[in-house]
Image (cartoon, rainbow, N blue to C red):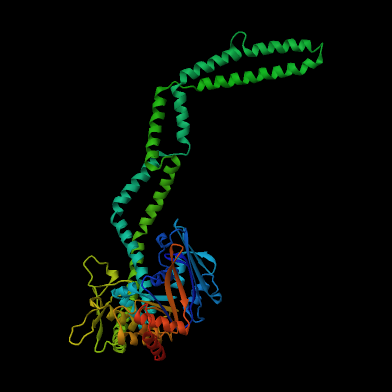
Amino acid sequence: MLRELSIRNFAIIDDLQIFFSEGLAILSGETGAGKSIIINAVNLLLGSRATAKLIRTGYETAELEALFQIKKQSPIVKIMKDNGYNPEEGLLIRRIISRKDRHRIYINGRLTTIGILNLITENLASISGQHAHQGLLKEDQQLAIIDQFGGLTAVREKVSRCFHEIVPLIRKLNNLKHKRDRQAEHIQLIEFQQKEIRQATVTLGEDTALEQERTRLKNSEALFQAVQGGIEMLYDSQGAAVEGLLAVKKDLDKASTLDPLLAPKAERIAEAAFHLEDIADELRRYLKNIQMDESRLDTVEERLDTLVKLKRKYGGSLEAVLLRFESIDHELSEMENLSGDIADTEKKLFELHGKLTELTHKLSRDRKKTAKTLAQKVEKELTSLKMPHTKFEISFRTLPADEDADPYLTIEEQTVFETGIDQATFRIAPNVGEPLKPLSSIVSGGELSRVVLALKAILAETEAVEAIVFDEVDAGIGGSVAEVVGKKLSSLARHHQVICITHLPQIAKFGDHHFRISKRISNGRTRTTIKRLSETERVKEIARMLGGEKITRATLDHAHEMLGKRN
């Protein structure tokens, strides 16, 4: 049940707070006072899409808040607990709409997502307004009403789950078959790749080593000259570095007899000479290995060209080439198992299709039985709503599967959807002698409003919603019809909290609570206000609804009389 509704900086509302109670709450007021804005606010709190256009001019954000009292037996209790909320605290929903599109949603003070909000509010409140009336004209909505009335939602959900198990398996099977169809060609391709990489006998780092060797081969003459010159300067030539160091050592050895401090220096010079001798030996060995072999250069160039092609083809590095070699083994192994995978998938699909067929047939049979009972009840309700002799019927049809349809999504050549094979149409003949026509053919808004109300009354005992909001329930009706609509709303309020926006005093008089919505200009801005009416104020409001802004003694007396005869 909706207990409190708070609206700030929303459209022409700057700050509005409403406290609701059980029973039938009536909201009335002049056209344009802001009644529909309140419905928009409730819709947003139930999960509708937010837009910055709704923010009151001059403000950066709008804020909406609603407090709901949740019954212990309500299915919402489990959903709240599953998502970490304590239903004993009630359900406090808060939405902040920002001009920067950084909208935020809070549930019981905790930031949350639109997905969680929709999950929790799915059965929280039902709003029957212009859009709801139009929604009733859609056949998928009509099918949902049949399932709700017949208690078939559980079977319908089983059909839906089975359907959604089949769909991805069909995609998997098609992919497997596509692979199989391409298998011979693909195997030939990857076996060629495997052979190509294997014959190349690639090793990690080989390309780097070969590039270094190529550089040496291309510059062998310059390297030879540099190394040969170094050897001569270090050891071979007259006055070489080693010879000079040994002469210095000899002189220091003599001098150390005069000063022992020079002895360590002489030893270090000797060590340096030995190191230079070693370096000269290493350079001689290097010199012997320097190749000036054009054929070897050609071999290295050819090998590097092979490796470059492999890298370009298989991922840009020798590591990628080797990884591709490993993955080919895995692919070939998978292809060996392809036939088994296809057989397993087909078996699973066959089993699921059998289950889907059984569930769909049961759902279809139960729907047809339910439809007869529902049609009789609708006719009875419409009679009480001043539409006597109305004929109401629910027809069913199936959609034949076309030749391209997947066999696992057809049953006896009929297309299966997640809701089953049935497509339902509500058909009505409001006047005697007229043929039954689809509900969407109804021209009269008053007749459509009463059909909506009739269905709401019938579904009242099965519908799990905590509150029902009616907007434009009085569209196209008046007089004695409005009287019976008011009685019906009052009856509906025994099962649910009902909030009704109306212009008709014949309906308003049945309210357990009455709110007047009005607008006024303050400091150059339009403001919407709402007030819960006392009994005296209510008489005046009913009188205004009867005769306009100019209230006379006659209209006041008439309002007193109406309120006195409301039961």
User: 175 above or below 409?
Assistant: above
| Residue drawn at 58 percent across, 22 percent down | 282
Give the image location of residue 406, x and y in percent: 27, 67
User: 451 above or below 298?
Assistant: below
Give the image location of residue 66, x and y in percent: 49, 72
Q: Give the camera-side residue of 98 and 301.
A: 98
Extreme-top residue of the structure: 238
Residue 84 left/right relative to 124 = right
| Residue drawn at 23 percent across, 76 percent down | 441
Give the image location of residue 54, x and y in percent: 41, 63
Residue 266 left/right relative to 384 = right
> Which quadrant of the figure has residue 283?
top right
Q: Give the camera-side residue of 358 and 107.
A: 107
Q: Give the camera-side residue of 398 and 356.
A: 398
Figure label count: 0
> Which quadrant of the figure has residue 86?
bottom right
> Which quadrant of the figure has residue 517?
bottom left
Can residue 321 be seen by looking at this rendering?
yes
Give the image location of residue 428, x and y in percent: 24, 82
User: 265 above or below 127?
Assistant: above
Which corner quadrant holds the C terminus?
Answer: bottom left
Can residue 357 be seen by looking at this rendering?
no
